[in-house]
Image (cartoon, rainbow, N blue to C red):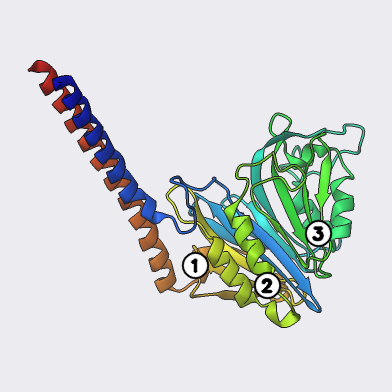
Amino acid sequence: MASTDIRLRIRILLTAVLIAFISLTSIQFHSVATFRDPVPGSCTIFSAAIGDRVLFGNNEDYYKPKTYLWTEPGTDSTYGCIYLGYKTYSHQGGINEKGLCFDANALPGSQLIPHDNLPLPPTYPPPYQDYAVWIPVLILRKAATVKEAVKMATKYQRSNWYPQSGDLKYQLYFADATGDAVVMSVDQNGELAFSRKEPGKSYLISTNFNKANPENALEYPCERYQKADEMLSRINSENDLTHDFFKSILDSVHVSGLFNTTLYSNVFDLKKGMIYLYHWHQYNEVVVLDVNKELAKKRYLIRIKDLFSPATVRNASNEYKGIILRWSLASILGTVILVLVLHYLRKIRSL
């Protein structure tokens, strides 16, 4: 009877530990129902085209807080580009002067056939001549349309996709000013696959499952995909397709957590060459950039937060500090309760 009573008390204490941890940590999540941080790199990407309007939307979801925007003016042989990403020119997305844009979703690895029989891809200028130009950067510099992007993607050996030990761990989304869009990924046979809009649909979405092979997924089925699909299906006319509507979708699918959060959101108007940028899922303030006007300036690199007002940056910082505080309190409380449980067990056994 006594041992049964002890086991019951232990269960109660362990349950208290779990409840305390959940109550302190689960409140930080905006749109994820399960008790965990969403998948690292869980970006949501989509575009839509109706009539004379073509928009592209993206949430950059990751844990690195320092994000940047930089320009790359065109030359006689390349188009001017504006990129978004991380320090040391780590390209995560971008748009060129012709209205072609890209972004990427993280995936589990899929074996990519290297096709060593094809020509070697172009390399960066010295002193980086030993490195192939990453394929989306090459495409943005050289292509004006999705059709040209697809052709370029298959032209060279696959070393410029930078597979890790032969595995490709992402898929690329391209959209252009004509309204065309494609998701480039690896199929079950190790070949590049090109997923287009479904018949009768004006939009295309990608999250963290392989469009050509859904079993290759970090998250499937994906709540963010389903939510974006539900909202985009409401578009009936060109008047419904606005950057404010795209902003509302990005807000609905943004994530907020310690190890993964929406660092920035962007809407591209591919017809007009406009960028609508949001910092750290603070959707009350937008920075609007004209692609051609920015490319006409001297080349520059800038922290994305430096484009926004002090109030927006402060709100984002306070939110992140709050998440860190809740996790810290949860860890401390969990440790304290665990120590008390162990102390209680020793005391019971000594009786």
Instruction: Relative to 3, say whether 12 is above or below.
Output: below
Name the residue at the left extreme: 351
Calculate the distance from the C-alpha at mark 3 to the C-alpha at mark 1.
39 Å
User: Residue 330: x and y, percent?
Assistant: 29, 45
Q: Residue at x 19, y 23 (%)?
A: 4
Residue occupied by mark 2: 234
Instruction: Relative to 34, say whether 97 is above or below.
Output: below
The numbered dot on residue 306 is 1
Would residue 6 be found to the left or right of residue 31 on screen?
left
Mark 2 residue element: loop
Instruction: Mark 3: give few (<14), some (14-19) or many (20+) Cα within 10 Å.
Output: few
Q: Quadrant of the C terminus?
A: top left
Can residue 264 be seen in the rendering of this structure?
A: yes
Point out the frontmost of discs 3 and 1. Answer: 3
Amino acid tagged 2: Arg
Name the residue at the front extreme: 1
Q: Earlier in the sequence, mark 3 or mark 1?
A: 3
Q: Residue at x 40, y 73 (%)?
A: 311
Q: Residue at x 24, y 42 (%)?
A: 333
Viewer-nearest residue: 150 or 140: 150
User: Residue 102: x and y, percent?
Assistant: 72, 58
Viewer-nearest residue: 144 or 71: 144
Amino acid tagged 3: Glu
The numbered dot on residue 198 is 3
Calculate the distance from the C-alpha at mark 2 to the C-alpha at mark 1.
35 Å
